[in-house]
Every structure is written in structure tokens, then in C-alpha cells.
């Protein structure tokens, strides 16, 4: 019998990485997850606990040796491991550069040495935050204007990935994800993504803390659609490419409130955040035949079925958000700080 192909998923115990793991196991890969569980959880993979094709190695990518046995004979590598909140990145830029840039270099080196000529693709989870306050719909060739260290670190990571493609001939692609949402979206840690914040508030019967006037919109893309895009970028013929992953159908924060139902309170709009994010997805559609299939109301309804999972998430209110975002106002809009 022919041996199964091997895939490594860094950050595979996290939100998107665990859905990528689902997709790869379904496609018949042996999946080796590398994750230090700093943001992810073993429970995100618990539904595969009896599957011998899945292994989880609790390792820090920053310490990954170039000759790591985990990457031996690997065909596909999906690099999701990273740290991703805005405010902590302003407070601890060194840590963000170490994990998101140096960590990426370690993954590139382990792939190059472990997989050798057998590597078919390394696909990197880049971020649309590299575009900053861009015109919309945003194309891949629009100007790069990172607004905070997280965005810069993800962009440097992308540059490293493309550089390894050029210098070492590693077959790479980089995927600039807009706003991924769906089951298992991270619930703990710093103040961040709107879903975790609102779901916890809904469970507690507290008002949703809407930023600005709530008319700002985000290009939300459902997580299984994201995993499918990564899969296609790994198995189809195009290499050395950058692709946007979004739904090209932005939704306002007020629309999310409408779908969830409940009262609102308002917190000040933050500097450096765009009023609208919207991906131009012509390139990925043309190259890979990908387009998102899960619409926003269906995606939100699926998440709501698991709302109990957000019971342990932090419960934010106007005061705690003001405190948590103090640094944001201080550094990104110095004119307004006291
Ligand atoms: N969620 C989004 O909308 C979005 C948008 C753009 C880019 N991205 C990128 O996609 C990737 C995955 O994001 P996510 O939303 O699933 O986040 P997540 O926090 O759920 O997943 C990241 C995973 O990486 C792991 N990790 C962090 N540091 C590590 C280290 N030093 N060594 C090993 N593992 C480590 C965490 O434990 C976690 O499981 C990230 O790189 C993020 O920057 C996400």
C-alpha cells in the first residue's frame, strides 16, 4: 500500500489551524501539528483523538531546530503559528518580531532541511493588516502600510517566506487573510476580535460594546472557506504567489448585532483602524477557482449553536475596554492622548 502524504500544520491547535487539520485529515494526509498551546487548545483537536494519522507536538517554533524530525519527509507545510493581538504588539514588539518573523524563519529552515526536494508547498498565513488604511476593494498589489507592530511582523514573515522561495527554491504561497470567523475562534487573552467579545456579552445578558457608531464594516470570511483556500494553494500549480482571502462582501458591526439580537453601548473609535475592509478576490478565484461558500448569517448561526464555548471568555465592558486600549490611543494617535 502507498504511504500517506505528510503535512505539518504549525499553530494547528489554534482557530484556523485546527480547521486546516480537519481538511487535511479528510483529504487523507498524515498531519503533524506543532503548537506551543500559548493561544490554541488541545480541545480544538479533541474530535480527532482516536485518529492515528494526527499527532500534536507541543513545541515553540522559536526553538525549532533546522533538523527537526517533525519536518522529515514533509510534503505540505501550513504555517499558522503566531501571535495576533494589536495592543500587546504595541506593548511588546520584540516578542511579536521573535515569534512572527524569527519563528517563521525557523519553520522555513526546518521545511527546507526536513522536506528537501520532496516539499510540494509551504503556505503562509499572512494578514490583510499589511494594507493599513487602504482603498477598497483592496488588491494584492496595493501599497503596504502596516499601522502597528503585529501588522509589520506578519508582513516581515511574508517577506521571509517569499525570500526563501527565491533564494532556496522553496515552493511557497502567502495568503493574506482578512477577518476569519467561525467555531473555535480564540476566546481568551487580550481584548480583540469582535466575535469573542460579543458572544460573551450575549451569554451574560450585557450590552454589546460597539466601536465607533458600528457602521464600520469588515470582510468576514468563514473559517472552513479559509482552510479550503489554503488547501487549494497547496495542491494547485501556482507558486510564489500572494492571495487575498476574503468574502468581498463586508458586513457592518451593527449587522452582527442585528443577527445576535440585544442592546448596545458605544466605545470610542480607534485610530489606525480602517472604516471598511474589503478584499478583491479576483486573483485567487482566477488562479485557484476558490470562492467563499458560507454566507454571513449562516456562519453566525453555526457559531451561535456553540455559544456555551464562550462562557470562559473575558467579559468586557466600556471601562475595561478603555483601560485595555489605552496604549492604542497613546501610541497611534499621540495628538489626542493626555
Ligand atoms: N484569524 C484571522 O482573522 C487572521 C487574519 C489574518 C492572519 N491570521 C493569521 O493566521 C494565523 C492563525 O490565526 P488564528 O486566528 O487561528 O489564531 P490562533 O491564536 O487561534 O492560532 C495561532 C496558534 O499558534 C500557536 N502559537 C503561537 N505562538 C507559537 C509558538 N511560538 N510556537 C508554536 N505555536 C505557537 C498558538 O498556540 C495558536 O494555537 C496567525 O498567524 C494569524 O496571524 C489570522
Image (cartoon, helix red, strand yellow):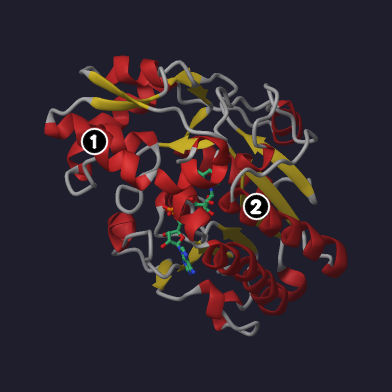
Residue for badge 2 = 152
Q: In front: 147, or 279?
A: 147
Residue for badge 1 = 317
Q: Splitting the image into 4 quarters, where does residue 168 fall?
A: bottom right
Could you say where residue 245 lies in the image, as x and y percent from the top left? Answer: 61, 35
Tell me the crowding category of disc 1: few under 14, some 14 to 19, or many 20 or more residues within 10 angstroms, Cα based. Answer: some
Name above or below for residue 172 compared with residue 294.
below
Name above or below for residue 82 compared with residue 36.
above
Could you say where residue 166 lies in the image, as x and y percent from the top left? Answer: 86, 61
Does the residue tagged 1 have its C-beta within 8 Å of any atom of ligand 1? no
2 or 1: tag closer to the N-terminus: 2
Tell me the crowding category of disc 2: few under 14, some 14 to 19, or many 20 or more residues within 10 angstroms, Cα based. Answer: many
Q: Give the label, 2 or 1, closer to the camera.
A: 1
For the point 45% across and 28% down, the residue is 269
Report whether 199 appears left or right of 233: left
Image quadrant occupied by the C terminus:
top left
User: SS for tag 2?
Assistant: helix
**Could one spot residue 308 in this view of the protein?**
yes
Name above or below for residue 103 compared with residue 191.
below
Disc sitting over residue 92 in the figure: none
Image quadrant occupied by the N terminus:
bottom right
Could you say where residue 153 lies in the image, as x and y percent from the top left? Answer: 63, 57
Amino acid at each position: 500500500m502507498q504511504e500517506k502524504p505528510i503535512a505539518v500544520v504549525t499553530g494547528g491547535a489554534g482557530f484556523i489551524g485546527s480547521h486546516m487539520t480537519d481538511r487535511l485529515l479528510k483529504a487523507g494526509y498524515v498531519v503533524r501539528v506543532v503548537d506551543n498551546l500559548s493561544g490554541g487548545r488541545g480541545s480544538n483537536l479533541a474530535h480527532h483523538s482516536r485518529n492515528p494519522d494526527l499527532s500534536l507536538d507541543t513545541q515553540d517554533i522559536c526553538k525549532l531546530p533546522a533538523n527537526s524530525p517533525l519536518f522529515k519527509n514533509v510534503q505540505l507545510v501550513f504555517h499558522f503559528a503566531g501571535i495576533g493581538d494589536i495592543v500587546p504588539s504595541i506593548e511588546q514588539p520584540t516578542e511579536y518580531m521573535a515569534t512572527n518573523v524569527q519563528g517563521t524563519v525557523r519553520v522555513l529552515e526546518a521545511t527546507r532541511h526536513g522536506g528537501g526536494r520532496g516539499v510540494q508547498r509551504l503556505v503562509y498565513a499572512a494578514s490583510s493588516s499589511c494594507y493599513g488604511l487602504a482603498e477598497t476593494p483592496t488588491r494584492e498589489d496595493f501599497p503596504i502600510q502596516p499601522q502597528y507592530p503585529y501588522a509589520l511582523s506578519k508582513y516581515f514573515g511574508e517577506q521571509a517566506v517569499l525570500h526563501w522561495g527565491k533564494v532556496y527554491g522553496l515552493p511557497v504561497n502567502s495568503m493574506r487573510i482578512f477577518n476569519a470567523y467561525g467555531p473555535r475562534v480564540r476566546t481568551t487573552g487580550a481584548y480583540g476580535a469582535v466575535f469573542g467579545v460579543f458572544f460573551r456579552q450575549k451569554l451574560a445578558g450585557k450590552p454589546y460594546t460597539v466601536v465607533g457608531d458600528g457602521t464600520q464594516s469588515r470582510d468576514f470570511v468563514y473559517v472552513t472557506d479559509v482552510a479550503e483556500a489554503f488547501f487549494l494553494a497547496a495542491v494547485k500549480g501556482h507558486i510564489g504567489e500572494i492571495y487575498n482571502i476574503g468574502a468581498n462582501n463586508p458586513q457592518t458591526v451593527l449587522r452582527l448585532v442585528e443577527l445576535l439580537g440585544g442592546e448596545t453601548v458605544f466605545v470610542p473609535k480607534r485610530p489606525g483602524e480602517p472604516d471598511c475592509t474589503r478584499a478583491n478576490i479576483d486573483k485567487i478565484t482566477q488562479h485557484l477557482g476558490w470562492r467563499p461558500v458560507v454566507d454571513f448569517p449562516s456562519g453566525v448561526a453555526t457559531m451561535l449553536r456553540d455559544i456555551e464555548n464562550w462562557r470562559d471568555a473575558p467579559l468586557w465592558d466600556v471601562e475595561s475596554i478603555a483601560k485595555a486600549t489605552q496604549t492604542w490611543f497613546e501610541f497611534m494617535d499621540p495628538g489626542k492622548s493626555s
